[in-house]
Image: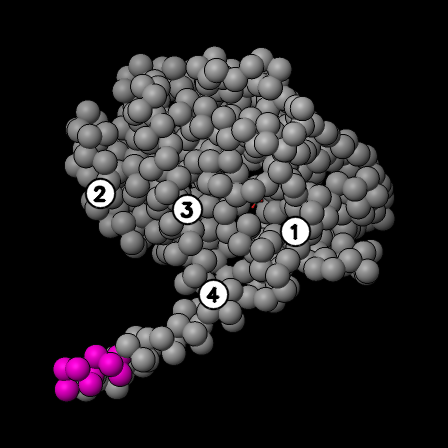
Amino acid sequence: MSRGAFFESVSHYFDRAARLSSIKPGMLDQVKSCNSVYRMRFPVKQDDGSILVVEAFRAEHSHHRLPTKGGIRFSKHVHINETIALAALMTYKCAIVGVPFGGAKGGVCIDPRTASEGFRERVTRRYTAELIRKNFIGPDIDVPAPDYGTGEREMGWIADTYKNLKMNEGNPYACVTGKPVSMQGIPGRKQATGLGVFQGIRCCLDRAEDMKPLGLSTGTQGKRVIVQGLGNVGYHAAFYLQTQGGALITGIAERDGGIFNPDGLDVDEVYRHQQATGSILNFPGAENVADSRALLERECDILVPAALENQITAENAPRIRAKIIAEAANGPVDFQAEAILLERGVLMIPDLYLNAGGVTVSYFEWLKNKAGVSFDRMVSRHEELVKREMIDELESLTGKTMDAERRKRLIKGPREEELVVAALEETMIRSYDQVHDFWKQRGLPDLRTAAFLHAIERVAESYTHHGIFP
Ligand code: GLU
């Protein structure tokens, strides 16, 4: 797969949707263009004392809303065009779920699997210092988050570096999201992308009129699912599909091979097995599939690619037998594969909607950091008092007394995580309804075109209202 293929796919999807809009060409150019890219090379000491020159990027795709927002990827395959394409997807993603940010993305060209903890920390802190130097990070400028190869630990180092170099700034921890909860992160952020994927799939499967042509009943209950990638996103998507959605996770594909069991795999047990043995292979009761890409071609109802871009191309698309492809990763289906799959009637839930749960909860974390107060602190006690009064009133009207345990449970005010999960669910449902209505009402060919067009119109509208084009 050429390195430009992903960039080309995003560009193709944009152009296809743009052709259906009535927005003027100059404005479309502005919506499509990446506003700024910072390319850096900096030296970092390796564990043996030698110096490695690390190449890294930060792309801010759209400044129509500030701050810009998007994850930082650690990967050997990081490339400037890939970073720009991912930043563009962030712009459209934020527009779809109504998160008031522009899109951005960072990439650091190191191998996260072989890098020691010390080396990762030195790279992360130096990268942060570079971003500060060029004004490419800040609570109101550009706010990174985790992505492939990074997590809470890296976000913690970024927050700490920023705080120490920007002592005088109010709310410095709002410079990055996906931080550990102990560093003003928000409970629920870690599982947010995967949970949002599950909620989005559920929204899609609830529509009888869309399931009928696929020969599927509504709902996730009993649906056969194959997941590619058991990282943070894949694990949580599979976990919620199984535990809350009643789906059967029949296959899991990882880098070193896949496992398959037509009766369903227990996601948590597979995860524990992977932690204990270093691989998902040889999981009790499951068939080992040596070629993990071949696993994607097995028959199933829903295929959830949750790893990297360009996993389904013109090469393997004709052999994919899933009825629905739920894009948990960014850009897993390239545009040539998409044409083949659409032709065969496969329903694709596009990445720019489906994996937007992560940035949605990042937005909540950022709001919390800016406000300097947690969400439950402001509402929990108030809710308790209101509920207590209602139950007292109910008891006096009915003359009955509620069981003490039940009363305690009902009266308890919400915890921050419950508020986050409920707000995420509301966002995923509302956004799906909007994109779906857009698809049907405008007579658009597919969900992805609808999502892109919807996002393009929102961003263009925002540019107009901000007076950038006087
Ligand atoms: N890296 C994630 C994404 O691709 C999260 C971005 C964020 O939370 O800012 O959506």
Crowding at dot 1, Cα within 10 Å, few <14 / some 14-19 / many 20+, comes out as many
Q: Earlier in the sequence, mark 3 or mark 4?
A: 4
User: Of callouts 1 and 3, which one flags the residue occurring earlier in the amino acid sequence?
Assistant: 1
Counting from the top left corner in percent of width and height, residue 465 is at: 59, 32
Q: Secondary structure at mark 1?
A: loop
Q: Is residue 64 above or below residue 342?
A: below
Judge by depth and name the residue closer to the eye, 228 or 140.
140
**Mark with earlier residue (1, 2):** 1
Q: Secondary structure at mark 3?
A: helix
Relative image position of residue 189 (x, y in whole percent): 51, 54
Q: Which amino acid, by three-letter code, is at mark 4?
A: Glu
- 104 horizontally vs 309: left or right: right
Question: Above or below — where is 455 with respect to 319?
Answer: below
**Ligand 1 quadrant assignment:** top right
User: For numbered disc 2, what is the local secondary structure?
Assistant: loop
Q: Which residues are magenta?
A: 391-399
**Amino acid carrying mark 2 in the image:** Gly
Query: Which disc, if any, is residue 416?
Result: 4
Q: Which mark is residue 427?
A: 3
